[in-house]
Image (cartoon, rainbow, N blue to C red):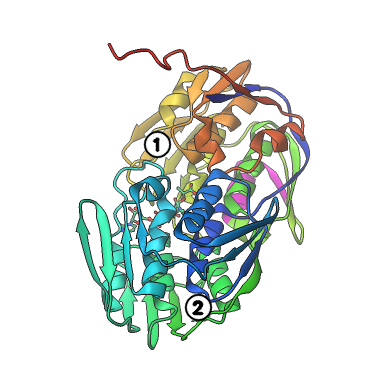
Amino acid sequence: MEKIIVNGGNALSGEICISGAKNAAVAIIPAVLLCDGVCRIENVPSISDVNVIIRILYELGASVKVINSTTVEIDPTHIHSHVLSASMASKMRASSYFIGAMLGRFKKARVAPPGGCDFGVRPIDQHIKGFEALGATVTIDGGMVNAHAVELTGSSIYLDKVSVGATVNIMLAAVKARGLTVIENAAREPHIVDLANFLNSMGANIMGAGTDVIKIRGVSELHGTTYSIIPDQIEAGTYMIAAAITGGDLTITNVIPKHLESISAKLIEAGAVVQEYDEAVRVIMRRRPKCCNVLTMPHPGFPTDMQPQMTTLLALCEGVSVMTEGVWDNRFKYVDQLTLMGAKIKVDGKVAIINGVEALSAAPVKATDLRAGAAMVLAGLAAEGTTEIENVEFIDRGYDNIVEKLSAVGADIRRVTYIDPNLGRSAV
Ligand code: EPZ
C-alpha cells in the first residue's frame, strides 16, 4: 500500500510542466482500433488510466511499441476480438469507448460495464441512443453491453444531456458509417476537439467539434498517423489552485490558456493574480482567498473535475462561498475528509455551503476518487502539520508524477509504502 505524506505551510514557487490530457488520451487510444495502420501518439501522460487502456488494446491483439516515456506506437492490424471482459473493462470509465470503436471497426461489440469514479448513477443511455440511431441493435445481458449492426448509417442524434462519453462514443461509431451523422447538444470539452483532430489526422471527416453540433461524414478507411495529445486542462487547474492555496507564485507551463479561462476567472474572483502567456499561466496569491460562488457546468463552464479542488481553496476563504455541482448527482463525498481537517462545509444534495476558516489542520485522510484525492493533496499543502493521504491509487489514475512535480516547487511531500495492518487478518 502507498500513501502520500504532506507537511503543509510552504508557499510554492517555480515552474510546473503539464502532461498530456488524461481524458483526451483515454478517448484517442481506443480510437486507434478504427485505423488500418500504425499510430504514433505523443505527449501521452504517464498515469494508470492510460496504462490500463493501452494494456487493453495489447490484450485485444494490438502491437504496442513504447518509444519513450510519453510516446507509443500502436498497430491495431491484428486485433480481431470484439469482446472486452469485466477484468479489463471494470478498471475505468473510458473502457466504454471500446463499444463505439469496436462497432466502428467490427460492427459488433461485447463490452462489460465500465468502472470509474463513484458519483452516483453513471448511465450510458445516451451512448446507446446514439448507437441505435446509427442502426445498431443494443442489448444488455448479465451486465455485458452487446451491440451489433448489419450496416452503420449516418443519422441525426440530439443528446438529452450534454455527455462527454456519449459524444466520444457516437463519434467513434459514426466515423466509418455510411453518410452524415449530426450530433446535437454535443459536449464541447477540449478533449472532444482533440479526439476529432486525431480522427481527422487519420482521414476522418469531422466538423464542428468544440461546438454543440458535430458533423461526421463517414469514410471507408482510416490510415495511420502521428498525433500529439493536448495538455491536461484539469492537471493545470489543479496546480493553479496549488499556487493559490499556498499563497505561492507558480508558472504552469505547456498549457493552452484558452482551456483554463473559467478556472482563471474564478481564481481572479478569489483574489489571485493570473497572468496568461502563449503556452503558460502564472498564478500569484498574496492574500487569503476571497469567497465566491461556483457552478460547475459542461465546457466552457467551470469544470466539474475542478470542483473538489476549488471547494478546498474556498474552505479557507473569508466569508461564505457556495459550490453548486451542475453535472453529477453526488460529487461531494470528499467533504467528510475535508471536515476532518477542520473545514466547515454543509452539503445539501448538489449544493455545498462553505464557511471559510482561517486554517485547516492536518489529519489522516483518504482519497475517495481521483479529483477528490488531488483536493486532499491541496488541503495538505495548506494545512498546519503533517497530512497523510491513503488510497493514492486514485490520484495516480490521473496525475503524472504529482509528488515529484510539487516537491520541485517547494512542497514538503513524499510517497511512502506501508503494510496495511488489516492485510491478511481473517475476517471476524
Ligand atoms: C467524463 O465522464 C470524464 N471522464 C469525467 O472526468 C467528467 O467528470 C465528465 O466527463 C464530465 O465532464 C472521462 O472523460 C474519462 P458525462 P463521462 O457522460 O463521460 C449524465 C475525471 O476526473 N449521462 O459527460 O462519464 C451523467 O450521469 C473524470 O477525469 C447520462 O445521463 O461523463 C452525468 O450526470 C471524472 N446518460 C452527465 O450526463 C449518459 O448516457 C455528464 O456525464 C451519459 C451521461
Assign the C terminus to one quadrant of the image: top left
Q: Is residue 9 above or below residue 117?
A: above
Secondary structure found at label 2: loop
- Tell how many labels: 2
At x 41% / y 26%, what residue is drawn? 336
Q: In the rendered structure, does residue 23 fall within the stretch colored magenta? A: no
Residue that numbered label 2 is attached to: 208
Where residue 5 appears, as percent x and y from the top left, is 62, 22
Please state the quadrant of the image where ligand 1 appears. bottom left
The boundaries of the magenta stretch are 262-274
Residue that numbered label 1 is attached to: 332
**Residue 341 visible, this orientation:** no
Q: Is residue 51 above or below residue 33?
A: above
Q: Quadrant of residue 280?
A: bottom right
Residue 329 in the figure: left or right of residue 191? left
Q: Is residue 301 above or below residue 413?
A: below
Residue 99 in the figure: left or right of residue 295? left
Where residue 265 appears, as percent x and y from the top left, is 60, 52
Where residue 195 appears, as percent x and y from the top left, is 53, 68
At x 43% / y 48%, what residue is drawn? 92
